[in-house]
Amino acid sequence: MRNLGTGIGWRPELTDTLARLPPPDWVEVVAENIDPARLPAPVRQLRAHGTPVVPHGVTLGLGDAARPGLARLAALAECAEALGAPLVTEHLASVRAGGLEAGHLLPVPRTRDALDVVCANIRLAQQFLPVPLALENVAACIRWPGEEFTEGQFLTEVVERTGVRLIVDVANLHTNHVNLGQDPVGTLDALPLEAVAYVHVAGGVEEGGVWYDTHSHPVPPPVLGLLAELCARTAPPGVLLERDGDFPGPDELAAELAAVRAATASGGRHV
């Protein structure tokens, strides 16, 4: 896996802000928001400067009981080719059932039956995609009954069975710690860190004892601490800051990126 460095999730609302800062090492775009035939001008400019662009899907539904739609897979493949992407990424989540869209990235039941379905869906996706696939752990507010694996064990089984790579979202690990009582450091220790493609960091807010993964707040110290914990264990090829609302100005965004770099360095590794 190539070294990506420190990047940011590109959003149209950040165009002017990013133009006033040094170019990011790389960017991630929401695949469903990109028309491969008409790439946004700022994305074309980033590519022209040699900035890697990674498409990040949100609707494939690799955790659904049904197989992922071939049209969705074809669109994701086309997006990867148009961007010259080094890999394609998605979420290990369920998004639809019985023709109904959840409108959210739902956690997958961590059972043996669900594991079989997920792995079959991943293998199908891998056949269609022109570049490697990486999957992200998701934030959750609920725990399905009858779980047979911890999150770390489930992700490890998925990697071992399919060869898929991982995006470790440390903000989602923090979310699941607050909401579900999961041990985020224990999850890190259980993961096959050699499979990490890159890392996500993002902000959120706690209200009434529930952590909301908003991507609209500054990255909090506990999430930066988990990033440092991960980087003490492995050198991730890349770290990416996500911001999807309440978009900051240049000074605030530069400070956030600096905090991400500092946390990465404090873990004893550099990207």
Image: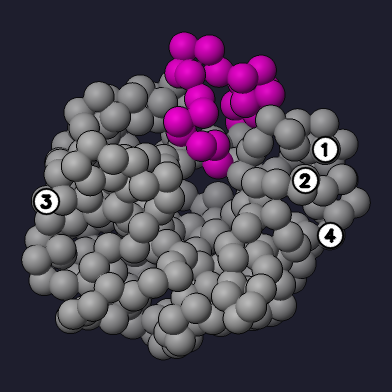
- Using the numbered discs, state the Cα–Cα distance from disc 4 to disc 3 in whole angstroms: 42 Å
Mark whose residue sits in front, 2 or 1: 2
Q: Residue at x 23, y 37 (%)?
A: 99
Q: Earlier in the sequence, mark 1 or mark 3?
A: 1
Which mark, residue 255? 4
Q: Are marks 4 and 3 in contact (CB under 8 Å)?
A: no
Residue 150 at x, y percent in the picture:
28, 81
The boundaries of the magenta stretch are: 28-50
- Using the numbered discs, state the Cα–Cα distance from disc 4 to disc 2 in whole angstroms: 13 Å
Q: Are marks 2 and 1 in contact (CB under 8 Å)?
A: yes
Q: Residue at x 51, y 28 (%)?
A: 33
Q: Which residue is mark 3?
A: 120
Q: Earlier in the sequence, mark 4 or mark 2?
A: 2
Element assignment for label 2: loop
Q: Nearer the viewer, residue 216 or 123?
A: 216
Magenta residue check for 44: yes
Amino acid type at circle 4 is Ala
Which mark, residue 17? 1
- Using the numbered discs, state the Cα–Cα distance from disc 3 to disc 2 in whole angstroms: 38 Å
Amino acid type at circle 2 is Phe
Residue 222 at x, y percent in the picture:
65, 80
- On screen, residue 227 versus residue 195, left or right, reads right
The crowding category of the residue bearing disc 1, from other C-alpha atoms within 10 Å (few below 14, some 14 to 19, many at least 20), is some
Q: Which residue is mark 2?
A: 247
Direction top: furthest residue:
37
Residue 89 visible? The answer is no
